[in-house]
Image (cartoon, coloured by chain):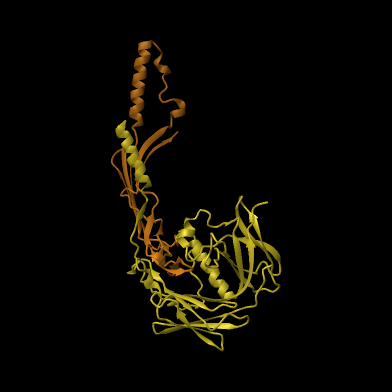
Chain colours: A yellow, B orange
Amino acid sequence: MKNKTYILITLTSLLFACRKDVNVKLPDYQEKLVVEGSIETGKNPVVLLSISVPYFGTFDFTTPEKAFVKGAFVTVSDGTIIDTLSEIDPTTGYIYLGTKITGQEGKTYTLKVRYNAKEYSVQSTLLAPVPLDSLYFRWEEDSLGFIWQHFKEPVGLGNNYRWFSKRLNTKYQDNFFAAPLFSVFDDKFIDGKAFDFSYDRGPQPDKIQAWRDDPKRNWYRVGDTVAVKFTHIGKTEYDFWYTYYQNKASNSNPFSAPTNVKSMFGQQEDVFGAFVAYSTSFDTLVVKPKP
Amino acid sequence: MAKYDRRHDASLVLTYDMNKLWNFGMVWVYGTGNRGTLPNGFFLYEGSQSHDYGLRNSYQFVPYHRMDLNVTFTPDREKHLEKKRKKLVERYIKDGKDTTLIQVPKKWAKHFSNSFTLSVFNAYNRYNPYFIYFTREGDFTNGTLKVGAKQVSLFPILPSITWNFKF
């Protein structure tokens, strides 16, 4: 009887031994300059520069700072003034901040990056703001729920939007306005319509792991004071973010369609990313207990 | 994955009738590996890692091949029926019954025949790739990122026993 049991276990384990680690020989990877830039109404331009990394190349993952770009020459121009952006920390690089220009409605901003003897440029126009009408909270559980926005979309096709939020509480203070997954939409099906929509809470870019570990990560809580930033962006900018979110959604899922992000730098193979001019409107909501 | 792009396809089939009772068979199948779109690298955006995919269907998986083996035993029905008839005649004589009443085989089983097959699918247990996915542990920004690739296969070695019959 014992022998028969051992045979059965061996046969069963053979049936389920169908996953193994493999060495994948990927094509040679050309690293790209990754540009994450933005300018908002009334704010200075900010540009984050890094390089993309091969999956199984020689890059040492214990030294991530080697992917951050140092010493690049970065300028943003509004057609009149040229603002040369400075690195916040020259030893690390990565974050470049302007001081002379602030975002103004109607202006077109040109970002130029000079790195490794090459120059890259991209433009974005700061459009007229589209105000969000009002915010309210809907409880899904006793102390948790989502923020809803009532919105009357202006008549005329071609508007695109992106939504951010930031908690201002003392206990759960967010450092940045964070955009949740698929926080962009266009007006193809909602042109001129009044409707309500909601988003969950997006991850803070400086606390990604903590966000992943939080079982209540997508929710807002009673007691939160939430600032919402509703932005109006252009078509190229929308296409970038929409394909970026499709890329995120397909990450590591072998059954989804792989999507590469539509870079604002077009078909250039050694640079990738976006420079987005956000026309902003704000509102704040205090989440009160369920009546 | 472009799973219908099987550029080359080859099959080898061998059968051997050793005698009226035993038959042996082998099938060997080979196909060029499927094509798929894999990420070649990744980039940091909004504090998290995202994939940078290569050209569509630019990656070719390893070739698919497997060997199936089978052995079939067909019992000698005439011999078995003759044995059965003899036994029944002996018993009828002993019990004093009329042996002309013996009906072997029965009317419903007149055309009955059967065989037993032992087969092994994927006899050398090749892990043909079904899909590949990438794993990530840790966080790129704090230097703890570890990446890896895993291959999932369907159907390792699969033995089976079949009883075939017709009547």
Q: Please identify the quarter of the rendering in which residue B76 is found.
A: top left
The location of residue B122, given as percent across then percent down, is 34, 49
Residue for point 33% across, 61% down: A23
Question: Considering the image in quadrants, where does the N terminus of chain A appear?
Answer: top left
Total marks shown come to 0
Name the residue at the front extreme: A170
For the question of whether residue B27 can be seen, the reply is no
The location of residue A57, given as percent across then percent down, is 34, 68
Q: Please identify the quarter of the rendering in which residue A61 is found.
A: bottom left
Considering only vertical position in the picture, is A193 above or below A44?
Answer: above
Task: Choose between A24 and B91: the one closer to the eye.
Answer: A24
Considering only vertical position in the picture, is B47 above or below B100?
Answer: below
The location of residue B97, given as percent across then percent down, is 40, 12
Name the residue at the left extreme: B18
Name the residue at the bottom extreme: A80
Residue for point 53% across, 54% down: A216
Task: Choose between A17 and A141: the one closer to the eye.
Answer: A141
Considering only vertical position in the picture, is A34 above or below B51?
Answer: below
For the question of whether residue A8 can be seen, the reply is yes
The location of residue A41, given as percent across then percent down, is 60, 77
Task: Choose between B165 and B154: the one closer to the eye.
Answer: B154
